[in-house]
Image (tube, grey):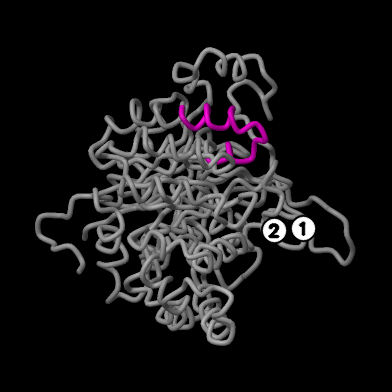
Amino acid sequence: MFIVDTDVHNYWSSAEVLLPYLEPYWRDFLVRGEKPGPTGSFPHGHRPWLHPEGFSRHDIRPQTEEDNYLIMKEKHLDLYGIDVAILTADEPLEASTLANYHYANALVKAYNDYMIEWWLPKDSRFKGSIIISPTDPHGAAAEIRRLGGHKAIVQVLASHGSQRPYGDPFYHPIYEACAEVGLPFAIHFGGQGGVNHNAVASGPTAYYWETHALLSQPAMTHVVSMISNGVFEKYPDLYFVVIECGVSWVPSLMWRLDANFKALRKETPWLKMLPSEYCRRNIRFSTQPLEQPQNVKHLWETLEHMDGQNTLLFASDYPHWDFDAPTNLHIPPAWREKVMGLNALEVYKRIEAPAATARVA
Amino acid sequence: MSAAATAPALTFACKTADVAVGKPRIVPYGRLSVGIFQLEDGYAALLNVCPHRAGQLCEGPISGTTRQTDKTEFVYERAGEIIRCAWHGWEFDIRSGKCLVDDKLKARTFPVHVDGDDIYLEMGR
């Protein structure tokens, strides 16, 4: 089966891999400047929650920078027969938490160059994401235009932690650039700290596991905001991909949105379709971490209401602790081919379709 | 019935020197593997496949855990008796194989026999 894994984290052992890619001025920041941990830690405004066991699977133990690839190849890409792995970085997403948006831009720019030079040539299965810091939408747009033509780059990626809902016109320069270069805009769980202090509604929770269960909260806000602000009227071909934010909340949110819109459409006269229709047309959701009810049929029935067969994209989140293995993904068997790989071809146009398989219409 | 027919089939796993408290030994078991653990009072063996999502159960950290309490306090206990799956961190009792949160979820265990320096497992079928 053709498998596209839409969330593979290319780890590093030390953020100092970025040093050769930073301008000298910013290199000094990373060498001598304050960091949130020891040498090698990545600058970010820290989140209020510390994972009590660490984020990585405990059977992934790189000793060298090269191991980060070699272990991924052995324990993930080859083991499960992954055909395409979309690299989603890891710590670089946290640049969005820094108040100094110039530094944030320098860090993500260095990461993007490092990823293109160090990771992409290692394996023909790799596709890259341009990481942006949404704190400076014009800087982000310039980065998208700088690298958007690279044939192995398949999306633009930001943290789901942000200062405003992503549909806010403040961010539209990002979508204009995405539309111009023909790339989807994706958000990934993270960036919950520093200037992004609204990561959990009502204020920060106390424990990591409760926070993780609420990872859908900002995603809900962003989905609603992208639809209501008319992003998909302005950029009708733009795909918005929501990664690692859960999925079973989508149907109930769409039910509420559609009902409200029928009454109060006058607030947003630029919308031409029901909110759920924009969602179905323009938004895709990665599966991981797929909810785990006692009775899997309850999940499947829920996912039917969001047309999951066509709107879900498989993601493993390798090598994190909440990883979903492709062999253990509890989705309806009839959906498997589409969710595991074919749906991704519709979103990520630069991924080559397997010879034996036609692109999904 | 002969003694041979009732005696359990034993399979050599490893030497006692290969295992230490807090340092399990992973040995092959067909296409899978088994983790051999030394505890303060003996040995235990678990299939290296987590009943949750088939992760490498025995390659995670060995730890203790907090006792269930009636007030806000943290009583750390059972140090060295809990294996935390390498993938998702679910906690299992090394001796019984039972998941701490749901004891209906049980990792496969194997009886361990020690003969001198040798550790044998009762593999069953």
Q: How many marks?
A: 2
The residue lying at 54 percent from left, 80 percent from top is: A265
**Camera sees residue B8:** no
Q: Quadrant of the C terminus of chain A?
A: bottom left
Query: Mark 1 is on which residue type?
Result: Gly
The residue lying at 46 percent from left, 60 percent from top is: A288
Q: Is residue A98 magenta?
A: yes
Q: Which residues are magenta?
A: A93-109
Mark 1 — residue? A203
Per the image, label 2 sits on a secondary structure element best described as loop
The crowding category of the residue bearing disc 1, from other C-alpha atoms within 10 Å (few below 14, some 14 to 19, many at least 20), is few
Asked if marks 2 and 1 touch (Cβ < 8 Å), the reply is: yes
The crowding category of the residue bearing disc 2, from other C-alpha atoms within 10 Å (few below 14, some 14 to 19, many at least 20), is some
Per the image, label 1 sits on a secondary structure element best described as loop
Which of these two is toward me, A8 or A146?
A146
**Pointer 2 chain:** A
Q: Is residue B68 magenta?
A: no
**Camera sees residue A242:** yes
Residue A179 x, y percent position in the rendering? 35, 51
Tell me whether marks 2 and 1 sit on the same chain: yes
The answer to whether B37 appears left or right of A180 in the picture is right
Query: Mark 2 is on which residue type?
Result: Val
Mark 2 — residue? A200
The CA distance from mark 2 to mark 1 is 6 Å
Residue A254 x, y percent position in the rendering? 51, 78
Residue A149 x, y percent position in the rendering? 28, 38
Q: Quadrant of the N terminus of chain A?
A: bottom left
**Pointer 1 chain:** A
Which of these two is toward me, A319 or B70?
A319
Determine which of the numbered discs, if any, sits on residue A118 in the image: none
The answer to whether B119 appears left or right of A39 in the picture is left
